[in-house]
């Protein structure tokens, strides 16, 4: 069975989840003795604090996305370098044969900029192979081993860049998944601790009870007194 992507259980952003957990620490420290009567041990409170800190240190998705974008930019630059090296060789072949001829097409590369990544790699591999096979035939037009080696070198760099991009995508997916799963666990702790605090204070201290609302809403400021209009 394929492992499904996790779904966030918390009803707000990860930043808001972290902030809400952080805000609860003060009440937990103050009410530790009272909460112990509800089964909340000091170890449980400390774990919640530690998990809050760990969650705050996890890289947000925006950072991972930018790292992936940087890898993509590097891959694009490497691709351009490979295309340029291939076009240099193909330009020499075109000096002797029209691109529509079989003699030109035997080099296995055409319309280079529009090739997919996989096809570009294969085309570059074939171009080097055929270039070395017919090196002497095109020496007069300027084909050299150095030009073919440049294509080979850029092709190897291109393959490595594709692997780096795949790794970056996998890293991003793994980091996102880990962050959601960790956030879910932290949210469950938040809910349980809030329930314990609310149950202790709700009948005796409404102000303290409000500190244990999972997702508190801002208290609206009272309306300004409206001026009395004389009739």
Image (tube, rainbow, N blue to C red):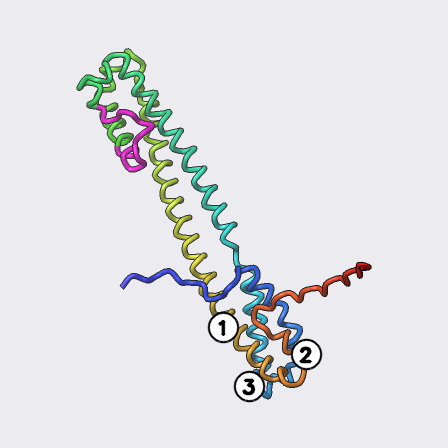
Q: Please give the range of residues in magenta.
A: 107-122
Choose between 51 and 214: the one closer to the eye.
214
Residue underneath mark 2: 30
Q: Is residue 156 above or below residue 102?
A: below
Is tag 1's residue or tag 3's residue first in the polypeptide sequence? 3
Residue underneath mark 3: 39
* Residue that appears at 41% across and 57% down: 174
Identify the secondary structure beneath mark 2. Answer: helix
Q: Is residue 202 above or below residue 23?
A: below
**Residue 58: % across, % down:** 53, 59
Magenta stretch contains residue 86: no
Report the side of 229 relative to 190 (left or right).
right
**Residue 52: % across, % down:** 57, 67
Report the side of 182 relative to 194 (left or right).
left
Choose between 199 and 171: the one closer to the eye.
199
Distance of mark 1 from mark 2, alpha carbons?
21 Å
Q: Is residue 137 above or below residue 66?
A: above
Identify the secondary structure beneath mark 3. Answer: loop
Magenta stretch contains residue 121: yes
Q: Residue furthest bottom?
A: 37
Distance of mark 3 from mark 2, alpha carbons?
16 Å
Distance of mark 1 from mark 3, alpha carbons?
16 Å
């Amino acid at each position: 069975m394929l492992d499904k992507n996790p779904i966030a259980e918390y009803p707000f952003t990860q930043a808001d989840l972290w902030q809400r957990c952080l805000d609860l620490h003060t009440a937990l420290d103050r009410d530790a003795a009272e909460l112990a009567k509800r089964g909340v041990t000091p170890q449980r409170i400390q774990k919640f604090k530690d998990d809050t800190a760990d969650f705050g240190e996890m890289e947000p998705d925006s950072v991972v996305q930018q790292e992936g974008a940087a890898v993509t930019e590097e891959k694009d630059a490497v691709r351009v370098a490979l295309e340029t090296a291939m076009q240099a060789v193909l330009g020499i072949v075109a000096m002797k044969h029209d691109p529509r001829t079989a003699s030109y097409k035997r080099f296995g590369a055409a319309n280079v900029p529009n090739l997919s990544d996989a096809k570009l790699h294969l085309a570059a591999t074939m171009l080097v192979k055929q270039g070395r096979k017919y090196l002497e035939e095109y020496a007069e037009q300027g084909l050299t081993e150095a030009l073919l080696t440049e294509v080979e070198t850029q092709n190897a760099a291109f393959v490595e860049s594709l692997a780096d991009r795949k790794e970056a995508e996998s890293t991003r997916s793994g980091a996102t998944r880990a962050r959601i799963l960790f956030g879910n666990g932290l949210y469950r702790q938040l809910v349980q601790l809030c329930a314990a605090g609310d149950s202790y204070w709700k009948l005796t201290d409404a102000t303290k009870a409000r500190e244990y609302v999972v997702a508190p809403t801002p208290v609206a400021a009272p309306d300004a007194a409206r001026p009395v209009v004389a009739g």
